[in-house]
Image (spheres, rainbow, N blue to C red):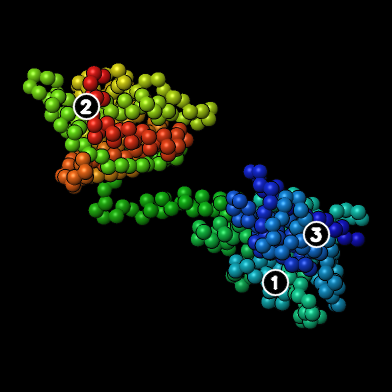
Amino acid sequence: MAEVREFTLPDLGEGLTEAVIVQWLVEVGDVVAVDQPVVEVETAKAMVEVPCPYGGVVTARFGEEGAEVPVGAPLVTVAVGAVPDDLAGDEGGTPCAWGSPRSSAVESGGGVDSAVAGPGGPATAPAPAPPEAGEPQDSGSGNVLVGYGTSSSSARRRRIRPGAPEGPAHRPAAPAPLAAAAGPAPTTEANGTRTVAVISPLVRRIAREHGLDLREVRGTGREGLILRTDVESEVRARAAREPVAVAAAGPVPGEERIPLKGLRGAAAEKFRRSRHEIPDATCWVDADATELLAARRAMNVPGAPKVSLLALLARICTAALARYPELNATVDTAAQEIVRLPAVHLGFAAQTDRGLVVPVVRDAQDRTVEQLSAEIARLTDAARAGKLSPAELSHGTFTLNNYGVFGVDGSTPILNHPEAAMLGVGRIAAKPWVHEGELAVRQVVQLSFTFDHRVCDGGTAGGFLRYVADCVERPALLLRGR
């Protein structure tokens, strides 16, 4: 006597309470396998194929396509271990748990169920032993994620068409018995062609996305079933083999190989880690730098310490960070904490013959413009001579990047891990600008600000950048004293 079990919409996670039925993947009368997707639903997060934890015959569906279903509401009922009447019995055949001969049906790479034929006709497998009395005929996985089913999978469903002709010539091959913890028929080779045993649509999709032929994958599941882990392992193995194949082919004539080691290697690793860990974003604004250049000329009088443009911008950065201290920070990923830092150790990008380096001005918030200019000049000379110490290249908390020296206007740089922010300054060029209500030619600069979105939102980042732009346009009061 078949047991009818009800499968309800499971909790799909993240507090979701309902889902909309997008498409039914089975109909009443279909034979389904354990963990076979039966319906596709849409939640507030994503489209999800929902697998049924029971194997058997679908006896009822609940809900039309487009209907909203709450979590816990019934989706389908399944007669566990049952078999449709038109699959029961087959004169002249060997009986099995389904009551009909069992063919070695497997699912081909194109998704069509087929029996592997040998020279003598369709191959038949020995009939499995029937279940003991009272023994449940499926184990029901209870899993709700496609591709993470039980190790003992059940047969591929086979659609039963009402009114189909009777008899051996028209009857489709019977699926394997659910009663014997059945899976797909063993992977078989016939006439040099290998068919594949796959149940999960996710497995097929992953293989298709990576250009992987499932006929080349050996399944580790029961009776040769190809699992998601099998496909992912093959994808990783292929990726590991590809560089070896390139190396074995020998270098391309004329190519040059530069080892990623030393300073260049350290920078490459830092860039990789920054892109991997930090969700960065960039905003930018144009500013009239005419008054900033005038202030620099006024400060560089004969006999006075020389003040560089970079020092003026560094002073603006420290003033802006005093207003927005949340940007002078880092993220402790292990503790899941934002760490706000008490001192501004200002890094600045410097191009050298050995590559890009970022010297650090310690305690920049306590230095005057003249002191900042002197320290930046000292560190730049040491960088170009290759004499910077490790301490002078580490523990920065904020970076100033003047890429305008390369003649470019803007950039979206990679943050200097583990810092949370970077100010970028483009070239200063003469452009038409509305000044005091009149169109005039002014010295215009593009400022960009890249920040770690974990540390602040766009409002804080925009406020910081706007304050920097205001200081560039009206620097006189800011540049007094420190």
Mark 2 lies on a secondary structure that is loop
Circle 3 residues within 10 Å: few <14, some 14–19, many ≥20: many
Q: Is residue 412 left or right of residue 67?
A: left
Is residue 14 visible in the rendered image? The answer is yes
Mark nearest the camera among 2 and 3 is 2
Specify the quadrant that holds the C terminus.
top left
Q: Of the residues shown, which amino acid type is indicated by label 1?
A: Ala
Q: Which residue is mark 3?
A: 77
Q: Where in the figure is residue 17, as x and y percent of width and height?
A: 69, 48
| Alpha carbon distance from label 1 to label 2 | 86 Å
Residue at x 54%, y 53% (from the top left corner): 234
Q: Are marks 1 and 2 in contact (CB under 8 Å)?
A: no
| Alpha carbon distance from label 2 to label 3 | 78 Å
Q: Quadrant of residue 440?
A: top left
Circle 2 residues within 10 Å: few <14, some 14–19, many ≥20: few
Q: Where in the figure is residue 319, as x and y percent of width and height?
A: 31, 25
Residue at x 92%, y 55% (from the top left corner): 133
Mark 3 lies on a secondary structure that is strand
Q: Which residue is mark 1?
A: 115
Q: Of the residues shown, which amino acid type is indicated by label 3?
A: Thr
Instruction: In this rendered view, identify the residue nearer to me: 466 or 381.
Output: 466
Mark nearest the camera among 1 and 2 is 2
Relative to 199, residue 332 above or below:
above
